[in-house]
Amino acid sequence: MSTEVAGADAPHVKGKFIGILVCWLLGNGSLFAWNSILTIEDYYSHLFPDYHPTRVLTLAYQPFAFGITLIMTLYEAKMNTRLRNLAGFSLFFLGSFALIILDVATKGHGGLGVFIGVCIISAIFGTADANCQGALVGDLSLMCPEFVQSFMAGLAASGVLTSALRLITKASFESSKDGLRIGALLFFSITCLFELVCLLLYTFVFAKLPIVKYYRSKAAAEGSKTVVSDLTAAGVTEQLSQVEEDPQKYKRLSTKELFMENIDYALDIYLIYVLTLSIFPGFLSEDTGEHNLGTWYALVLIAMYNVWDLIGRYVPLIPCLKLTSRKGIMAAILARFLFIPAFYFTANYGDQGYMIFLTSFLGLTNGYLTVCVLMEAPKGYNGPEQNALGNVLVVCLLGGLFSGVVLDWLWLIGKGCLDVLCETNLLSLGKYFGLLVCFVLGNGCLFSWNSMLTIEDYYVYLFPKNHPTRVLTLVYQPFALGVTALLTYHEAKINTRLRNVTGYTLFFLSSFAIIMLDVATKGQGGVGVFVGVCVIGAAFGTADAHVQGGMVGDLSMMCPEFIQSYLAGLAASGAITSALRLITKAAFENSRDGLRKGAMLFFSISCFFELLCVLLYAFVFPTLPIVKYYRSKAASEGSKTVAGDLAAAGVPAQHDEQVEEDPKRYERLSTKKLLQQNMDYALDIFLIYVLTLSIFPGFLSEDTGLHNLGTWYALVLIAIYNVWDLIGRYVPFIIKLKSRKCIMAAALARFLLIPAFYFIAKYGNQGYMIFLTSFLGLGNGYLTGPEQNALGNVLVVFLLIGLFSGVVLDWLWLIGKGPVCVPNSLTWSSSKAWHLLEKKQPNHSMTL
């Protein structure tokens, strides 16, 4: 390379404007063909009315886009970027041409065979996207930031252009015979031409721009092999053999190391597209109702999304509006999940003006945050690392797209359960959506508390002398037990709706209080702060008392699947918080104040999740037809607890007059008699949780010794327990234990785990401990499932008594450990020496 010169003729400046324009066109070409399929959704809906083409075609496209990109990212350092991009644009061109040929050959007729053909072409587009998007983002990441910004703007512009063209062609041919088909064919003819232009631009123009040659030569000088073909095509061959001469000089971070250093950016880009694709285009096309715009409504919404997505991608070019803080980007992305309830309520109760505004804001934030992440992430790395990181971020982007596409079906599942069989089968109406809501509400019941338990490494660091895992659990359980017992005693007269809304609201406020306490004290420890955390732990216990008893009692009068789904949600909260904790620990492990950052991110997520639960329980769950049916049935049998929920759902409770007319008809067993008839179930649930809480989480956190996993050991054990507890709650669907004697025998047999854990902690290795912990979780989840279907509030009281008793018994491990650690015959100095020696023993098995 020649020496750099100052001014406009410098190689890193010359050709920049043309490069930005070409990047914009290449971004267009990377999605133009696919957006064409999406934008003519009215034509495909006409051809294939029974196949939900918008959703199915997206589902056919995304696995290929994601899977192939993932494979190519793993081998990114050895890939020929030029060949990859040429293959991608060629596939886009050929796929677009194939759509025209397929439509001409079938004369515009539908049918399953034609639909399968369109799905195959969608998969080809996904393969083309995997080649182009990952390669171009990686390639442009090693150049000036304006190039990747222009490419991302081009991706958005493809949506705007296709939407504008679709509106024009629809208007032009609306009154003509076979107008939909003519517009679609014209559309794909334009697409074919555009993809051919992109192929020629990338092949013969982009590689020869001086600014592009400068950055690629710089990357080659830093050890990049991916730019070799492009430099050869541009006639640059000077620095291509240097890597072979001195390979040590060009060492770079591996893809895994880059991912770990940028896991927050990877999560950012994933969450952006999970949210966006769970709404766009499927929900906007099929689930927004009928309005004044008629068949134009979905097209207008898609066009508004695309326009504002494009605008959002230019906003970061204004320096004062660019978001550079990693925390700020993550907070903004998490806040976008409020779109889900907003879109739901607007689709059901709002008008088209509100829907257009929401869709515009969805597009604006999608474009803005995407560009912020992709411009900030590559900074500070050399060329080969920037290329690799670009590929990694595109994998996360496509993973988010795929996950969002799958989640988008939940709108359809919920809607289908609400709309199908309205007149004939009321019991199944809304059942699947109800199961999902019960699962989420079960999650919310323990999400905040499990968040506190799962960040035990942070609290052990803040309060090393206070045994926080054990003390917080001991503070939590008396409030959970006492308030639940009180509410159960007066259960027949309590407004269940008010009880549950109070509980979830208290969870939300307490999670927020934890964040405020940590911010106010700047992450410092001390007795005062520990007392504050204990008070919040007590608030969590009070909230649990309201929610768990109220929900179990309420769901016990409905179909058994609801309570099973709720209990699975309780277990899933542990698995989810454990997974999040492992991710945040890995993300912030090497950063300054990493433990605190992970903990605060944790409770921010918890706050959002609890708010979601408040909204779901208050506004969604009571309106489901199956829920209204069961609650009306309970009211007709004399229940007063459902009156608040029925009123919220617009169903008047009429049992009061009926009770006065025939009071004997509505007599029910007292709580005492119910307990006497189900004493074995109550004892079962007590024994299950006495055993579990005497080991989890205190013993697992503090008494399992030191092993190869270091500070990760306790987190891994807690995560393993939570995962197997969740699995155990689904096992009764396959193998269900119905015998009351067998359930009791199994609950008693679990007490053999106590000596097993003791001896494994003393003499075993981490493999045996992980196995035992898995078995503890599996048994807990499996045996809990069949129990709580029998009684509601009463069994929850015994569950909480078992929890409380287990927490108290858990201290026996610590008490027993104290005197054993230092023999009485040793003096103070020798005991200190003993302690130092003992620290070196990983399994605490040293003897005198």
Image (cartoon, rainbow, N blue to C red):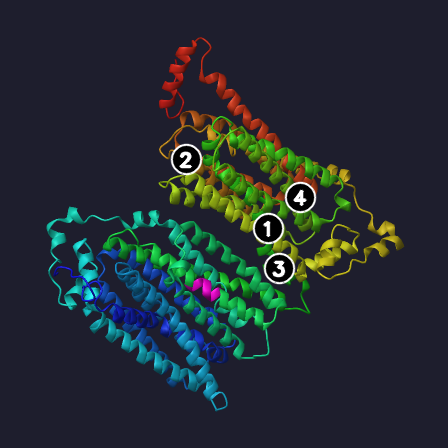
Label 4, label 3: how far apart the Cα atoms are: 25 Å
Residue type at mark 1 is Leu
Residue at the far bottom: name it.
Answer: 176
Asked whether disc 3 touches disc 2, contact meaning CB atoms under 8 Å apart, the reply is no
**The N terminus: image quadrant:** bottom left
Label 2, label 4: how far apart the Cα atoms are: 34 Å
Residue drawn at 71 percent across, 55 percent down: 645
The residue indicated by pointer 3 is 431
Residue drawn at 62 percent across, 50 percent down: 563
Residue type at mark 4 is His
- Using the rendered image of the protein, determine whether residue 109 is visible from the camera's viewpoint: no
Label 3, label 1: how far apart the Cα atoms are: 15 Å
Residue type at mark 3 is Lys
Tell which tag, 3 or 1, sits nearer the viewer: 1
Q: Nearer the viewer, residue 431 or 642?
A: 642
Q: Earlier in the sequence, mark 3 or mark 2?
A: 3
Label 3, label 2: how far apart the Cα atoms are: 40 Å
Q: Nearer the viewer, residue 617 or 4?
A: 4
The residue indicated by pointer 2 is 713
Label 2, label 1: how far apart the Cα atoms are: 30 Å
- Left or right position of 148 against 441: left
The residue indicated by pointer 1 is 441
Per the rendered image, the range of residues in magenta is 362-367
**SS assignment at label 1:** helix
Asked whether disc 3 touches disc 1, contact meaning CB atoms under 8 Å apart, the reply is no
Question: Residue 173 in the image: x percent, y percent?
Answer: 46, 88
Label 1, label 4: how far apart the Cα atoms are: 13 Å
**SS assignment at label 2:** helix
Q: Earlier in the sequence, mark 1 or mark 4?
A: 1
